[in-house]
């Protein structure tokens, strides 16, 4: 069923001699299909096609792009059973997770389709002329967002659907009017191929230009380097590790024409538990966080990697309960031998620090490629002076930080690097009396959570999935929700332009009937 070829626009291509296979971590063996790594010539073809497509695609009416996105969703659903099967073969994740992620992916695509139908996303702003203004007449100025150009999207290892081939980066870029070249993740190239086939069918059905989408296979890193260095690529979307994301950012900045890299690079997602709530809820909190830490083998960028509390009898009760409950949870399969290898190596590196004590460690035998959950603890005073303790351990691991008092706890939070999320667990009275702590945490995170868990990212306009560096490369933008479209556009102003040459979104009669900022007032009225 799988062919292992690259999609260079609408055409299949396998010019190269380098091949690779995906891996089934549950069966601990390679999957059958050989995937052809793209050559430099195929990369250039994809980039040239994408740029040529951009010249047409950027001017295609948003309602037609909406139909294109809906067609992508429809075509994915037609082959969903095949996608789920290959997804599970390439990840070791259960079919329930695959189906859930597929549903989320479809929902994301549909949400951008609806956004295009409304049309307000272009952020139209109009300030009309005043020829009688003294001493200088006021010009007519009209501004809206326009697409950047071809976008390179890197598939994520831990989300083969929602953050990969037709995931949020791709859906938002296509919605904005930007062609997309996906650098498929080698761990789930088969899943990417199936989803790509659905996108290409939608391209043909809706009459989109050839080259509006390409899917590039590669088992190594050079292909990604070649893609990001191609001068026709105008922006990059990435979800993955800090090391890889930072490398992409450096490559993009060193080009003759630097381009933006919107990278989400992981997080340790600090959880702060205040003393009062522990007196009555320590056992329930232990259950909730044991489940959160081990969910999906901890392979989420929002996994609670650090839990901070103040030394007390009740904090000790919480720690003891969490330690017991986390060991009662059956270990699960990780995505790939490389991922479990990195998990074990990074975990051993952290717990080898003489200031760190292991307080729970799953020691029973497990199947190959299954993780073993671990908890460790460190004093707040030691955490403050050791930045290495902030390294993300991608897997079912969490570090507990025990502080002497609230002053030290605030110092610990103030020391933490930029994160995707920060959580405060507290009673209503505690949260109200600790506004200084909230202010400190707000400066460190992209999403602040009250009495919840960080795992789980709702997809809507109010979600901010990003945060201060190193959680992301630009804290002003989100990688989730319809507002993520803002990454792929730039503002353009028209001064004193003839009405017939203006985009419909900026014309006096507002033919799209969108909400616009006209002379400082939001309105749908004609001018």
Image (cartoon, rainbow, N blue to C red):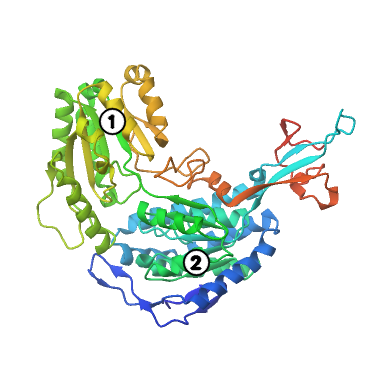
Q: Residues within 10 Å of mark 2 (few under 14, many from 20)?
A: many
Name the residue rendered at 86%, 28% in the picture: 135
Q: Secondary structure at mark 1?
A: helix
Q: Position of residue 36 (x, y in %)?
A: 42, 78
Q: Residues within 10 Å of mark 1 (few under 14, many from 20)?
A: many
Q: What residue would you read off at disc 1?
A: 412
The answer to whether residue 211 of the structure is visible from this angle is: no
> Circles 2 and 1: CB distance less than 8 Å?
no
Place residue 420 in its image quadrant: top left
State the quadrant of the N terminus: bottom left
Spatial CA distance of label 2 from label 1 is 40 Å
Q: Which residue is more in the foreground, 73 or 25?
A: 25
Q: Is residue 141 above or below residue 88?
A: above
State the quadrant of the C terminus: top right
How many marks the image carries: the answer is: 2
Most extreme residue toward the left, as rendered? 364
Does residue 452 appear left or right of residue 237 in this picture? left
Q: What residue would you read off at disc 2?
A: 227
Name the residue rendered at 43%, 56% in the picture: 102
Q: Which residue is more in the foreground, 167 or 37?
A: 37
The answer to whether residue 289 of the structure is visible from this angle is: yes
Name the residue rendered at 25%, 33% in the picture: 384
Q: Position of residue 522 (x, y in %)?
A: 70, 32
């Amino acid at each position: 069923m799988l062919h292992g070829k690259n999609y260079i626009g609408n055409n299949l291509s396998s010019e190269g001699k380098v091949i690779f296979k995906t891996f089934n971590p549950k069966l601990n063996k390679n999957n059958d299909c050989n995937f052809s790594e793209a050559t430099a010539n195929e990369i250039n073809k994809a980039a040239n096609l994408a740029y040529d497509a951009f010249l047409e695609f950027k001017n295609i009416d948003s309602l037609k792009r909406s139909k294109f996105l809906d067609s992508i969703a429809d075509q994915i659903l037609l082959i969903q059973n095949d996608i789920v099967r290959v997804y599970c073969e390439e990840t070791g994740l259960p079919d329930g997770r695959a189906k859930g992620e597929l549903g989320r992916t479809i929902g994301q695509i549909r949400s951008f389709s609806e956004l295009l139908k409304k049309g307000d996303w272009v952020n139209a702003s109009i300030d009309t002329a005043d020829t009688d203004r003294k001493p200088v007449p006021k010009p007519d100025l009209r501004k809206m967002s326009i697409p950047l150009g071809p976008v390179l999207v890197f598939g994520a290892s831990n989300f083969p659907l929602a953050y990969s081939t037709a995931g949020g980066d791709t859906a938002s870029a296509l919605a904005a009017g930007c062609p997309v070249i996906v650098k498929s993740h080698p761990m789930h190239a088969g899943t990417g191929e199936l989803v790509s086939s659905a996108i290409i069918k939608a391209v043909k059905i809706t009459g989109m230009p050839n080259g509006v989408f390409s899917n590039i296979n590669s088992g190594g890193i050079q292909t990604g380097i070649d893609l990001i260095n191609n001068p026709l690529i105008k922006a990059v979307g990435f979800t993955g590790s800090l090391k890889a994301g930072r490398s992409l950012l450096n490559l993009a900045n060193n080009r003759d024409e630097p381009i933006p890299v919107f990278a989400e690079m992981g997080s340790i997602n600090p959880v702060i538990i205040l003393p009062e709530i522990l007196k009555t809820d320590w056992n329930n909190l232990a259950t909730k966080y044991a489940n959160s830490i081990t969910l999906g083998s901890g392979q989420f960028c929002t996994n609670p990697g650090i839990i901070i509390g103040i030394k007390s009898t009740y904090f000790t009760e919480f720690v003891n309960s969490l330690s017991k409950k986390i060991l009662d949870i059956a270990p699960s399969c990780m995505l790939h031998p490389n991922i479990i290898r990195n998990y074990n190596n990074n975990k051993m590196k952290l717990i080898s620090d003489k200031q760190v004590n292991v307080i729970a460690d799953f020691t029973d035998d497990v199947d190959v490629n299954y993780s073993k959950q671990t908890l460790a603890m460190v004093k707040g005073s030691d955490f403050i002076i050791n930045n290495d303790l902030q390294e993300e351990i991608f897997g079912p691991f969490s570090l507990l930080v025990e502080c002497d008092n609230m002053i030290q706890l605030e110092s610990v939070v103030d020391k933490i690097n930029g994160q995707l999320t920060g959580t405060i667990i507290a009673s209503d009275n505690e949260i109200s009396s600790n506004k200084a702590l909230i202010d400190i945490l707000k400066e460190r995170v992209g999403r602040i959570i009250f009495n919840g868990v960080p795992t789980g990212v709702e997809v809507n306009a109010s979600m901010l999935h990003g945060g201060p560096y190193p959680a992301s490369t630009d804290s002003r933008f989100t990688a989730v929700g319809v507002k993520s479209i803002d990454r792929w556009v730039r503002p353009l102003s028209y001064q004193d332009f003839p009405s017939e040459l203006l985009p419909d979104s900026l014309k006096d009669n507002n033919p799209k009937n969108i909400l616009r900022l006209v002379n400082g007032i939001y309105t749908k009225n004609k001018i």
